[in-house]
Amino acid sequence: MQLIVISSEDFIADEINIIEGLFECGLTHFHLRKPNATLNEVSTFLSQINSVYHDKIIIHHHFELLKQFNLKGAHVNLLKFPLEEAKQLKVNHLSISCHTLSELNILKTEQFNYAFLSPIFNSISKKGYLSPFKKEELYEALKKHKNIVALGGITKKQLATCKELGFSGAAILGSLWLSKNKIKTFKKMQKTCQ
């Protein structure tokens, strides 16, 4: 099962070193999601990350930076960025977010590298963001849909459940960025995914 990391929403101390450390530990998919950051702030941030890692970075905003930094691809919110426009980005990687099983059924998820489905468990980083899903429903849905990544409340303990349910991957945010030792946390979770 693949382990994906989503950035902290805000810029944090020593973030570049942490991100590069995650790449050195084998991270292959890093989602850069800074919803309140300006184009210039994201550009400056990307320029500080060693360019050998740029092909592992997927951005959620400021898609004009894709080619400039030779990034892996884009993650789109189809409510804000229509599918036809997303396809015109012509990227190697395109992923989306879904929040209900009916969205999975409506979307042709095979058009994307993967789809985040959230929150699978109660969110760690967004207080009060509770999971609406029942395990049985998820299990049945994941028989039909491939390349679905669990997001929301993912801890080391929850990774086994994600595997059992049939998720192709898990994306972590709060459990990593709220931990004291982010590299150590990633390594433990990565080991659980193997």
Image (cartoon, helix red, strand yellow):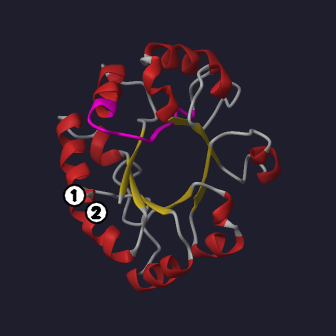
Q: Amino acid at mark 1?
A: Thr
User: Split into 4 quadrants, where in the image is the C terminus?
Assistant: bottom left
- Could you say which is closer to the camera, residue 98 or residue 110? 110
Name the residue located 75 percent from the left edge and 46 percent from the top edge. Answer: 86
Disc with the residue nearer the chain's start (2 vs 1) = 2
Q: Position of residue 142 (x, y in %)?
A: 49, 76
Q: Position of residue 131 (x, y in %)?
A: 43, 68
Q: Amino acid at mark 2?
A: Leu
Compared with residue 181, is residue 98 higher up or lower down, i.e. above or below? below
Name the residue located 56 percent from the left edge and 17 percent from the top edge. Answer: 41
Disc 1 target residue: 192
- Could you say which is closer to the camera, residue 139 or residue 80? 139
Q: Residues within 10 Å of mark 2 (few under 14, many from 20)?
A: many
Name the residue located 20 percent from the left edge and 52 percent from the top edge. Answer: 191
Compared with residue 12, is residue 115 higher up or lower down, i.e. above or below? below
Q: Which residues are magenta?
A: 23-35
Q: Secondary structure at mark 2?
A: helix
Disc 2 target residue: 159
Q: Residues within 10 Å of mark 1 (few under 14, many from 20)?
A: some
User: Split into 4 quadrants, where in the image is the N terminus?
Assistant: bottom left
Residue 56 among magenta residues? no
